[in-house]
């Protein structure tokens, strides 16, 4: 966001934390909310899925123009749970 670089990871613990915060009823609900550029979902994911970088600075810099890039990043991070990578078997 802006000049703030972040690394996110869709770990199961992180996804569970985002799901709990958002009161999602299913994985499909969580995925839809993250990919659908919902403000609360985007902010929760930045806070709970960031593994490197200044998430507080990123949240402070967050603007609506960043939401598409966030949605794309969340989709990529979630994709490895569905694409059959050997480490996820």
Image (tube, rainbow, N blue to C red):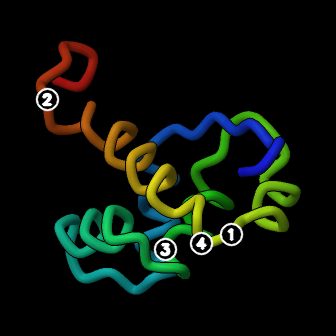
Q: Secondary structure at mark 1?
A: loop
Q: Which mark is residue 41?
A: 3
Q: Residue drawn 39% across and 47% down? A: 72
In this picture, residue 41 sits left or right of residue 27? right
- The answer to which of marks 3 and 4 sits earlier in the sequence is 3
Find residue 59 and report its horizontal and vertical position in percent: 76, 64
Q: Are marks 1 and 2 in contact (CB under 8 Å)?
A: no
Estimate the spatial distance between the alpha carbons at disc 2 and disc 4, rounded to whole Å.
30 Å
Please tell me whether mark 1 or mark 2 is closer to you in this view. Answer: 1
Residue 37, quarter of the rendered image: bottom left
In the displayed structure, would residue 61 be above or below residue 69?
A: below
Q: Badge 1 local density, few (<14 within 10 Å), some, or many (20+)?
A: few
Estimate the spatial distance between the alpha carbons at disc 3 and disc 1, rounded to whole Å.
14 Å
In this picture, residue 40 sits left or right of residue 11? right
Q: Which mark is residue 83?
A: 2
- The answer to which of marks 1 and 2 sits earlier in the sequence is 1
Q: Are marks 3 and 1 in contact (CB under 8 Å)?
A: no
Estimate the spatial distance between the alpha carbons at disc 1 and disc 2, rounded to whole Å.
31 Å
Find residue 38 and report its horizontal and vertical position in percent: 44, 78
Find residue 5 and report its horizontal and vertical position in percent: 74, 36
Please name the residue that numbered disc 1 is placed on: 63
Q: Are marks 1 and 4 in contact (CB under 8 Å)?
A: yes
- The answer to which of marks 3 and 1 sits earlier in the sequence is 3
Residue 46, quarter of the rendered image: bottom right
Q: Residue furthest top?
A: 86
């Amino acid at each position: 966001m802006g000049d703030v670089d972040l690394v996110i990871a869709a770990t199961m613990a992180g996804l569970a934390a985002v799901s709990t915060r958002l009161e999602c009823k299913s994985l499909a609900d969580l995925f839809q909310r993250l990919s659908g550029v919902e403000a609360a979902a985007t902010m929760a994911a930045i806070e709970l899925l960031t593994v490197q970088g200044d998430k507080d600075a990123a949240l402070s810099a967050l603007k609506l123009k960043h939401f598409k890039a966030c949605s794309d990043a969340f989709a990529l991070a979630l994709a490895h749970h569905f694409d059959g990578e050997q480490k996820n078997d």
